[in-house]
Image (cartoon, rainbow, N blue to C red):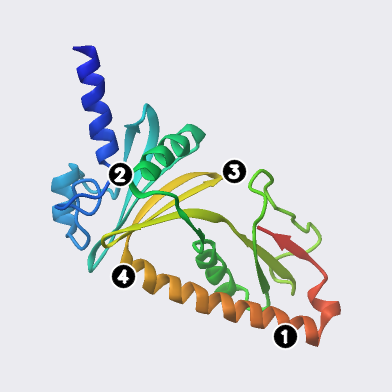
Amino acid sequence: MKKIFVFILLSVTVGMFLFSQEYDVRKLKWGMSFEELQKAEDLKTDFFKDEDIFGIKVETLFGIDLKGLYSVSYSTQDKNFAVEVLKVLRKKYGEPKTDLDYSFLMKVKDILKRFPRLIVQIYEKGNFNVLETELSPELSLNDRKIIRAGLSKRSMWEYGNTVVFLLNSPEGIVLSYWHKPYFLDNKKKFIDFMAELKLKAKDEEVKKPEDTQQGIEKF
């Protein structure tokens, strides 16, 4: 009886991560309303809930706007979660592609609105074991300086109308499912914004290298 219970529990857990004919992720469909999401997930007023998956505590967050549900993500600090999820996704969908995590650029965009004199350089992080953070104590955000923003690599799968990402970094583990049209639209915006940042940083270095090199922050 115990073996049967464990098998059923594992089947339910694995089913949360796999595509079916009827649903896009879990027992949800992209574009469903918050009322439909509340009923399906037994939510009250919040867009998130705590769950136990693979015996690991994770926070599950539902992304929804006026057009309906567009993402579901799981986050935790437990590295074992990435190990277990990777086994399931590889078995079902094969080896992943590689993509960059563009979400940090949204934070940069907000900072630039408040401090337009900042210069931002984007680069790809190569070592996830070391947090590439270097702060300059001499300068405040009001000074002209460069922010070098490192984008992390993440594993990527595609199926049906869904894109899946697994980010395994020192900051934590994030497994996210996105409605493909929503993701592609936002990725284009991220790439265009990144190109603008690179061009701005390059122009500023050519114009006034002595000013832009005063202080550097890495993220």
Q: Are marks 1 and 4 in contact (CB under 8 Å)?
A: no
Viewer-nearest of discs 2 and 1: 2
Residue at 40% in and 30% down: 56
Residue 31, x across and y down, in percent? 20, 63
- Element class at badge 3: loop
Nearest to N terminus: mark 1 or mark 3: 3
Crowding at mark 3 (Cα within 10 Å: few <14, some 14-19, many 20+): few
Of labels 4 and 2, earlier in sequence is 2
Q: State the separation of the CA atoms marked 4 and 2.
A: 19 Å
- At 23% from the left and 48% from the top, the residue drawn is 45
Asked which secondary structure carries label 4, the reply is: helix
Could you tell me residue 105's position as x and y percent?
A: 54, 67
To which residue does mark 4 refer?
181
The mark that comes first in sequence, 2 or 3, is 2
Rendering coords of residue 180 (x, y %):
32, 65
Residue where numbered disc 2 is placed = 17
Amino acid at circle 3: Pro
* Residue placed under numbered mark 3 in the picture: 170
Q: Which residue is mark 1?
A: 203
Which image quarter holds the N terminus?
top left
Viewer-side residue, 34 vs 168 = 168
Q: Which SS class for mark 2?
A: loop
